[in-house]
Image: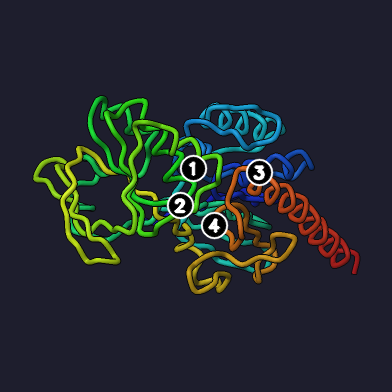
């Protein structure tokens, strides 16, 4: 069965509705550009899986889902449309660009890619088999299932330490397993974890296997310095070892680096004219709500300039 082709040509289509995508849609729709947001899940991106946001200006502290809802209301207040869709490919045409989803084809003069990133997997035995049965990548989603039970968090960055501390409100104990001998997280997050009696640390150690038949029972660990192998009983393991860009649908455009992060200039424009990228999917030094919002505002303004230049070119051709 063929895909349904939409007749309307939007000025801007934003792919993804995290903070960067929603900000871009806010700027373009407020500039009176016809704007469509395409999202394969709920608005908010990683925000909807974040318990508390404490480092976004204007809020002393706000729950991630609440901030996501606020941003969605702001993004759609000037007429930006919203639809569900799983984008598979972009065809970069001259008159307009085509966005191919699983069941429809949309048209746009310019595109803002805001597809974000997803949590990286370790790639060890038991990880896929027990996913959803004790293996998780989202403390906010699954933490409440583990009341008064021992949990393990794998990683040493901001997400691992922050979510590990969050899990202590449910777990009997949280053990953070890190392959190095010191954390990479922000100091304020480290201090909270070190001062929490429910948090333990195992240093210089990697997880070799997640054990269990129907649910997680234990983790097989290996010390990277001594080679010593040990077993750590646990009812759940939360994995935070980094991110992978959600950019597979755009690889044929030649706009990514070797790791799949989309490369942009200071205006958030890629090497493909009229295609912009913002937020976590972009090659950048910091992936936070604030940086995604900044990216979105720049891309929204740049998209407006790009669309206006197209209209001017078209007017000149019609005059000739």
Label 4 and label 3: CA atoms lie apart by 15 Å
Q: Position of residue 166 (x, y in %)?
A: 41, 32
Quick one: label 3 or label 2, which is nearer the N terminus? 2
Q: Earlier in the sequence, mark 3 or mark 1?
A: 1
Inter-mark Cα distance, 3 to 2: 23 Å
- Foreground label between 3 and 2: 2
Percent position of residue 293, x then y: 67, 44
**Numbered badge on residue 183:** 2
Instruction: Determine whether label 3 and label 2 are within 8 Å by CB.
Output: no
Q: CA distance from mark 3 to mark 1?
A: 21 Å
- The mark closer to the camera, 4 or 3, is 3
In what quadrant of the picture does the N terminus appear?
Answer: bottom left
> Which of the numbered marks, if any, corresponds to residue 282?
none
Above or below for 4 versus 169? below
Tell me if label 4 and label 1 are in contact, CB under 8 Å.
no
Name the residue located 70 percent from the left edge and 44 percent from the top edge: 34
Find disc 4 in the rendering and name its residue. Answer: 281
According to the picture, the residue beneath numbered tag 3 turns out to be 290
Numbered disc 1: secondary structure: helix
The C terminus is located in which quarter?
A: bottom right
């Amino acid at each position: 069965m063929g895909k349904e082709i939409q007749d309307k040509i939007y000025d801007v289509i934003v792919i993804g509705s995290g903070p960067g995508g929603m900000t871009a849609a806010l700027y373009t729709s407020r500039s009176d550009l016809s704007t469509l947001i395409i999202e394969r899940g709920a608005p908010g991106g990683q925000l909807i899986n974040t318990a508390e946001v404490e480092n976004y200006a204007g809020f002393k502290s706000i729950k991630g889902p609440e901030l996501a809802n606020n941003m969605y209301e702001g993004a759609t207040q000037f007429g930006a449309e919203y639809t569900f869709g799983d984008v598979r490919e972009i065809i970069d045409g001259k008159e307009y660009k085509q966005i191919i989803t699983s069941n429809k084809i949309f048209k746009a003069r310019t595109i803002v890619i805001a597809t974000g990133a997803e949590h990286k997997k370790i790639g060890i035995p038991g990880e896929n088999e027990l996913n959803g049965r004790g293996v998780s990548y989202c403390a906010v989603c699954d933490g409440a299932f583990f009341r008064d039970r021992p949990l393990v968090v794998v990683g040493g960055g901001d997400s691992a330490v922050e979510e590990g501390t969050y899990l202590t409100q449910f777990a009997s104990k949280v053990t953070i397993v890190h392959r190095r001998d010191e954390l990479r997280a922000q100091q304020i997050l480290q201090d909270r974890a070190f001062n929490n009696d429910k948090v333990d640390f195992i240093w210089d150690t990697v997880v070799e296997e997640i054990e269990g038949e129907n649910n997680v029972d234990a983790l097989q660990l290996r010390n990277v310095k001594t080679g010593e192998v040990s077993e750590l009983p646990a009812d759940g393991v939360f994995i935070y070892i980094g991110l992978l860009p959600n950019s597979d649908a755009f690889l044929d455009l030649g706009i990514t680096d070797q790791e799949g992060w989309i490369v942009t200039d200071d205006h958030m424009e890629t090497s493909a004219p009229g295609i912009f990228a913002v937020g976590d999917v972009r090659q950048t030094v910091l992936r936070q709500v604030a940086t995604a919002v900044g990216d979105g505002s720049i891309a929204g303004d740049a998209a407006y300039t790009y669309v206006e230049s197209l209209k001017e070119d078209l007017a000149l051709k019609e005059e000739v």
